[in-house]
Amino acid sequence: MDQLDPRLKTFIIDYCSKYKVHGINPNELHTNTSIDLDLDIVAIEIDLFLAEFAEQFNIDSSKFSWYRYGYPKGSARVRIIKMLFNYDRKWVKVLAGCCYKPKFKAQVLQEALQTGKLV
């Protein structure tokens, strides 16, 4: 797993703290981290997340479309699994991944940092 750009890692940690998304382990953030499944940023929150990301890093998001990734709306089944079991356990992550396929990963944001465009 590739390491995240330190600026992106700091942004994600600050965003999750600011909006009290949920506690995240900064050591487990990597390019394969799912924004919608692992961080549980879905629905309207993900639009706010992307807007703040584009604003903070001066990223052109004019050509971005959810058509490519599918709009992440979350899953009630995954929320129940996370609530009943500790999501830090590997088998819980695998089970949650079977119930809900992650659509939007941190790799997309890292590429946007490098190119200056979110597509």
Image: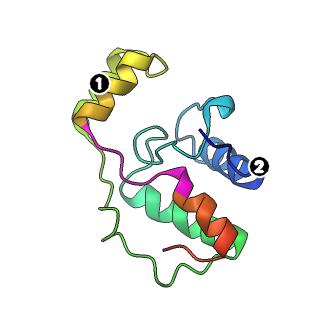
16 vs 30, nearest the viewer: 30
The residue sitting at 26% across, 41% down in the picture is 75
**Rendered location of residue 44, percent (x, y):** 39, 60
Q: Give the residues in magenta.
A: 100-107
- The part of the image, by quadrant, that contains residue 13 is top right
**Side (left or right) of 107 relative to 45:** right
At label 1, which amino acid type do we have?
Answer: Leu
Of the two numbered discs 1 and 2 on the same chain, state the one appearing first in sequence.
2
For the stretch drawn in magenta, the main secondary structure is loop
Which of the image's four quarters has the N terminus? top right
Total marks placed: 2
| 86 on left or right of 23 | left
Residue 39 placement, left or right of 111: left
In the rendered view, how is the structure colored?
rainbow
Using the image, determine if residue 88 lies above or below residue 79. above
Query: Residue 6 shows which numbered tag?
Result: 2
Q: Position of residue 83 (x, y in %)?
A: 36, 22
Element assignment for label 1: helix
Q: Amino acid at mark 2?
A: Pro
Asked if residue 116 lies left or right of residue 36, the reply is right
- Residue underneath mark 1: 95
